[in-house]
Image (spheres, grey):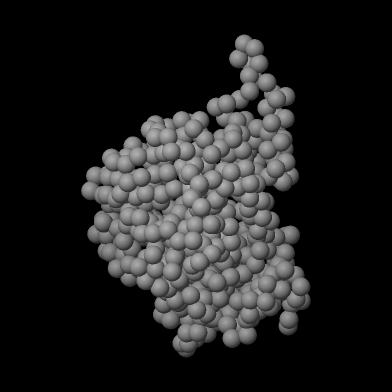
Amino acid sequence: MTDPTPVLRLEGIVKSFPGVRALDGVSFDVRPGEVHALMGENGAGKSTLMKVLGGIHAPNEGKIFIAEEPVVMTSPMQAKAKGVVFIHQELSLADELTVAENIFLGELPLKSFGRVDWAKLYARTDAILKKLNVRFTAKTRVGDLSIANQQMVEIGRALTVSPRAVIFDEPTASLTDAEKVVLFDVIADLQSQGVGIVYISHRMEEVFKITDRISVLRDGQYRGTLITADTDEDEVTKLMIGRSLDLSRNESHHEMGDVALEVRGLSCGTLFQDVDFAVRKGEVLGFYGLVGAGRTEIAETIFGLRNPTAGQIYLNGREVRIHSPIDAVRMGISLVPEDRKGQGLVLSMNCRDNMTLPQVDDMTAGPFVSDGAEIAIFDQYRDKLDIRTPGWRQLVGNLSGGNQQKIVIGKWLSMRPDVLIVDEPTRGIDVGSKSEIHSLIRDLAAQGFAVIVISSEMPEVLHVSDRIVAMYSGKVMREFTSEEVTEDNLIQAISGITEKVA
């Protein structure tokens, strides 16, 4: 039996920028009714390939075929008109407009004299929202929605047409587990209609759960296509980065010091209640739980972004009052936030200025900042963290996700903290960079830092942590050592099944 005609095919795509050959003869196709994963490290060429498909970049060489008809894409609107729809990781919504206006932006139903047919608009939107199984309405202002719900609005845009192919770029990065189930149901529904799905993701468990084939790019080149059912994570990883990764449990052993940070009975309204834990110098303490469990809110309270309603915080055995992030930094606490682009970096600034931003006052002589001092700090942590950038003048926004995360970590390490809190350290980062960040976290503990890691990924928290705090609905349910924790008892704890053990 011959393979079905692809709904979408790219052949020999070449794209060069000044000094960089981003794509070097890449070919890729997606068949009707299949989910085809496109994988690779940050900088492998995935986004560039999709921008060529969407008409944002014109290829230097190569061809694009829709149902074997050659096309030239000149804009995303033209791509959509030809049945190719993009669901972007970076949201492109208008906060002040309603859900309905965002979903049908540029194609609002009209009555005579160019007036919007509001009844038809809301009816069409309600039909889409029903498929997505969401609780907000067509008239809800998008700016009032959570990031996860805004992502569902972005997905809703794909359902306004009868697409031939839908490209999902890291679609679950901001979704809860329940919303992921809805997304996968939407994808399955599209498959049943013969729509081809391109699924770009760093999350191996998702790729192996829903895809039929996996194609891999590395350094702008096509490295191969695998049938999902016939391969495994190790084979895919080798194609992506050219080596195997250490994905084992944390079994490292080094001497730990005194307690660096302790909280007793810490509460913050309804966000979390009566939280007790301690982390020692030289230890990685992992926090694991479902979205909404209160993990990030605990970190923000310790860092002075929220005011506790009860409880005490102790640093090196002494009770402290932390009213602001400035207090926290002065006391030796640093926080690498979950949203590195929105909260951890200024993307339009260069690498040096991002890394030294918290220390500008300390490096000022009169009205001027000491360039030499800033460059010395940047050079030190570029070498220490293996940050891959041509130099300090490079804009942070042009770096890969893994190198951006290293810039944020370097910024706070340069403040010489006693306690480093890292929230979702590898979100949106490719598998190779993820392994480097994990090794970096373990190395920091070995150097005597007290490290708190908040993660939604079980393999990650198992791999890096000496102890794990399991949370459910704002409460600590259990605390596990790396020797006693299992996937089963950890899942039970974060599901609220296991009561807190004294």
**Which of 319/417 is in front?**
417
Q: Does residue 130 appear anywhere in the picture?
A: yes
Q: Name the quadrant containing residue 126.
A: top right
Does residue 172 appear left or right of residue 232 in this picture? right
Residue 453 x %, y %: 54, 70
For the point 41% across and 80% down, which residue is it?
447
Residue 369 x %, y %: 30, 53
Does residue 134 appear left or right of residue 38 in this picture? right
**Does 373 appear above or below 110?**
below
For the point 52% across and 76% down, which residue is it?
463
Q: Name the quadrant containing residue 268.
A: bottom right
Q: Does residue 265 appear anywhere in the picture?
A: no
Residue 118 x %, y %: 69, 23
Residue 117 x %, y %: 68, 21
For the point 73% across and 83% down, which residue is it?
502
**Does 295 appear above or below 439?**
above
**Which of 203/217 is in front?**
217
